Amino acid sequence: MFKSLTILYVEDEENIKEVVNSIFKQVFKNFIVASDGQEGLDKYIEYQDTIDVVITDINMPNMNGLDMSIEIRKINTSIPIIITTAHNDKEFLHKAINVGINKFVTKPMDMKFLLDSVKQVVEPIILKQEFDKEVKLYQDKQLQNAKFTATGQLAAGITHEINTPLTYIKANFEMLGYDIEDLPDSNIKEDIVKSISKIDDGIHRIETIVSSMREMSQQLKIEKKDANIYSSIITSAILAYNKIKHVSNVYINGKEFNLDIDKNELKFIAHVELQRVEQVWIIIINNAMDELMKVDDYAKRRLDINISEENDKVIIIFKDTAGGIDPKIKDNLFEPFKGTKESSGMGVGLSIAKRIIDDQKDGSIEAYNEDNGAVFKIILSK
């Protein structure tokens, strides 16, 4: 408790001041000392935003402790004030009570009693601060839940409206593909097949968007199991390959990614919902590609994905060279609709990623800037 407090101590007797200062400066976060009431008032005005308790003597030159306390009360009606005094007459006590003195400590001072007095006067303040903090956390959580509820309702409606025509388009497109296969070989057929490949990529992207929106609208129930995180990242990179091949080289644990890479070359086992976690990797990889496209020099584009183990944790770090996260959105990066990139769609991708990681056992995700790039660090339990 004491290590978080700043004390203003006002005393004109040098020997007492030195003894108290030598003890209390080791106990409290900050211990500000003044030699008379006027200096004490000046220092209170200067440091009023940080001072938690005032301890003052009474009889001092320039301004006595009671008059100083009266002036301080004009500035702050609730700051705890403790008086150290040899006075015990009723007139003095009555005046001190009217000023709003919280505690009296008689001289010669018992240091333990003085510390106990400080504890007694600050406990209600600290409890109120902790209560206010808990209330704010609760309110923030309620607001976040409300955002997710509203987003989920919107996503559920849009997903339903998109999914039906998408299924119809996909089925007919597959039938069209079979018909084209039956055509005799020709340059026209070859051009059509190339065009169909691009259309197929577009359909798969729409399916990915629908899947992300479904994640926003409902909590998918997927069983947790032991899974190779290295293999899952390879799978996700393969799914994002059409974008990766045009944008940037990707390195996984120092090895350049390609379609022939062995998924089981390395093993990092974590207990996760595999399909949902793979969705996180796709979101982060796609976000990195969107940002790396803005780097003009292709040779300077790079995404490194490193997987390691530490005790019972698997640590995954994505690090790009795209210039880092915009400070304007860094603090709200994982909130829905906070994205600023044109290619980020609704700006819900990272909020989905955080929600998925938070649902894993002791899972955590954080983002920060390092070496002119963005870093996403994910920790999962084995």
Image (spheres, grey):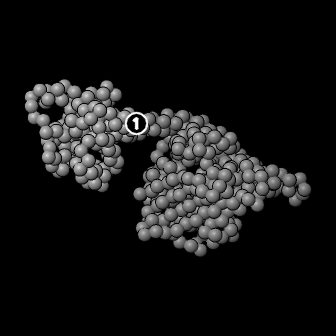
Q: Is residue 71 above or below residue 84?
A: above
Relative to 351, say whether 264 is above or below: below
Q: Position of residue 276 (x, y in %)?
A: 52, 54
Residue drawn at the location 24% of the way across and 39% of the way down: 56
**Res. 245 in view:** no
Q: Which residue in the structure is indicated by mark 1?
A: 46
Q: For the view shown, which residue lies furthest in the front direction?
A: 61
Q: Is residue 243 above or below residue 63?
A: below
Where residue 179 appears, as percent x and y from the top left, is 78, 52
Q: Secondary structure at mark 1?
A: helix
Name the foreground residue: 211 vs 249.
249
Left or right placement of residue 327 versus residue 273 in this view: right
* Kind of residue at disc 1: Glu
Along the viewing direction, whichever of 242 and 197 lies nearer the viewer:
242
Above or below, 282 against 137 in this view is below
Residue found 61% across the figure and 48% down from its top:
325
Looking at the image, residue 51 sits to the left or right of residue 326; the answer is left
